[in-house]
Amino acid sequence: MTKRKSFRKLLAAVCALTLVGGMGAAATANAADPAPWAPGAPAKGSITITKTQPDKTTPVKGAEFTVTPVTEINGATFDLKTQDGWETVAKQVNKLNADPTEGVKLGTAQKKDTDAQGKAKFGSLNIGLYKVEETKVPAGYSSDVKPFFMTIPEITGTDSANLTYNYNVEAKPKNKDVKDSVSKTGDYSATVGEGDNVSYTITSTLNKKGKLTKDDIQGFAIFDDAQTDAFATIDGAAVKSVKIDGGADLNLTEDYTVDVTADPAGYEVGQSGRTRVQVNFTDAGLAKIAAASTDSAAPKVLVNLTFKLKTGDAAPDSVTNKFGFVPGKGAGEPVQPPVIREPKDPDPNNPNDPNYPNPTVKFRQFQINKTNATDNKPLAGADFIAFADKTKAEKCVENDNRGSCEGASANFGTRTTGTDGKTPAYKARVGATFYVVEKKAPEKFILSNTVTEVTIDAGNDAFETNIANVPIPNSDPKIAWFKMPSTGAVGVGIFALLGAGLVAGGTAMHMRSRRRENA
């Protein structure tokens, strides 16, 4: 019974070590190998690190791993060729999981890079406990891998009766493409068209997690590569807020600064057409970000930006979002280049997937086509205003005096129809919904009290909304309306003559009757 309990305790300890960091160790050795304390046990083994992307199949080349034998834990030596040695390690498992550095004395380290198959094999290793660290993350990747421990051999099984001892062990940590660490969403609630504001929020997950200090994430930065020809002004004032997800806002100057650079790195020189607005963190800001990191999750930092679109002929046909971040690095780690995220349309099967940055924002020419309701001919001289808020548009039409309606779009302004009946073109955002109100009707026409809802769909030609006016009846003989007889016309004269004849006839009959009475 004592032996069985000892094996159960040993098995629990081994499993705890194997699962540190969630590595998913896998055995490749002969399952018939004996226990390390048994006669004939192998004297050597190996550790193979297989590095993949999160899909578990795509290999990652160039990740450096360091494997180091552990010789003491909190002053206690051990020999894993004995059961006593395993029990010594078992007593330290919780401490190792909590802090892989405290009280650990190490031997001579070996370093290897993963090859094209994502593998780094450390062969001819003595029986023992090993600390494994990813000491270099390949460019273009971030790592969630914290230091972990492995034993040679790896002991698996459910009971002392079915234990196996595997001397060639494989761990499969995963690297994440750093592009998946940053995403961007757009807020277009205030964007009807040209001249309006466009707001964005960039969410960047730190490329490291665990117990961090500011020295572990030096150089971490977040940037927006704004389309230079799309916005009226691109400067540091575009950054409206910076915060740690779930925490307080960070403070400009104290926690971060903003740099603005034309033609930024990462593009062909002179060909980017972009201006980079980059948030760089001070040591104080990095310390706050590092403090938010845990063993299970890296902190997220949110940057909110707002830009004003150009107007008129300079207004853009589209705005393509590009953005990214600079991975943070510790002392001795290589500098990684900026990671630029291209826009990508959402997956139709998963439109809310945050790994798909928001797509290009497109604009389309919009015009109001004004006509006479009676003959559909174009009308010049009609003034129109627009609203993003339907309630304010409806309030405006309650009064025929529409000179100062609250909430009218300043960027749309007042647009007047020309001789062709059309207003000057206005670049409106595809997908935008807004509300058009007639501010002043053409002369001799009735002011419309209709609120016209407009939703801009995709297309290459100008999007037109047709709005007709009713003429004021008989205001002008040139304006088509019902034809009414005028006073003094021929028909009236005939009736007058007939009336005069009847009067004359009546008078003659009356005089004849009087003469008869006097005779």
Image (spheres, helix red, strand yellow):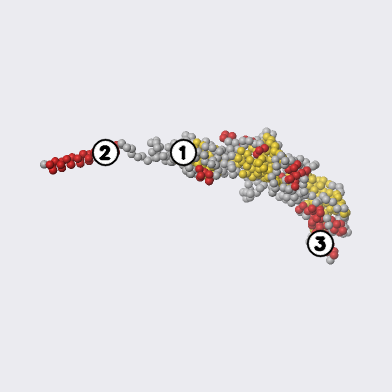
Residue type highlighted by circle 2:
Ala
Residue type highlighted by circle 3:
Arg
**Which residue lies under the disc numbered 1?**
441
Question: Upstream in the sequence, badge 2 or badge 3?
Answer: 3
Q: Are marks 1 and 2 in contact (CB under 8 Å)?
A: no
**Which residue lies under the disc numbered 2?**
496
Q: Does the image show residue 182? A: no
The 10 Å Cα crowd at callout 1, few under 14, some 14 to 19, many 20 or more, is many
Q: Which numbered mark, 1 or 3, is in the foreground of this view?
A: 1
Residue 71 vs residue 215, the one in the foreground: 215
Q: Which mark is residue 8?
A: 3
Residue 450 at x, y percent in the picture = 48, 44
The 10 Å Cα crowd at callout 2, few under 14, some 14 to 19, many 20 or more, is few
* In the displayed structure image, the side of residue 98 where residue 432 appears, left or right: left
Residue 190 vs residue 356, the one in the foreground: 190
SS for tag 3? helix
Quadrant occupied by the N terminus: bottom right
* In the displayed structure image, the side of residue 433 where residue 39 appears, left or right: right
Residue type highlighted by circle 1:
Ala
The span from disc 1 to disc 2 (Cα, nearest Å) is 42 Å
Residue 124 vs residue 294, the one in the foreground: 294
- Residue visible at 57% across and 44% down in the picture: 431
Q: Does the image show residue 15? A: yes
Q: Farthest residue to the left: give it.
A: 519
SS for tag 2? helix
* In the displayed structure image, the side of residue 500 where residue 57 appears, left or right: right
Residue 116 at x, y percent in the picture = 76, 45
The span from disc 1 to disc 3 (Cα, nearest Å) is 91 Å
Q: Farthest residue to the top: give it.
A: 270
SS for tag 1? loop
Residue 512 at x, y percent in the picture = 15, 41
- Residue visible at 79% across and 49% down in the picture: 147
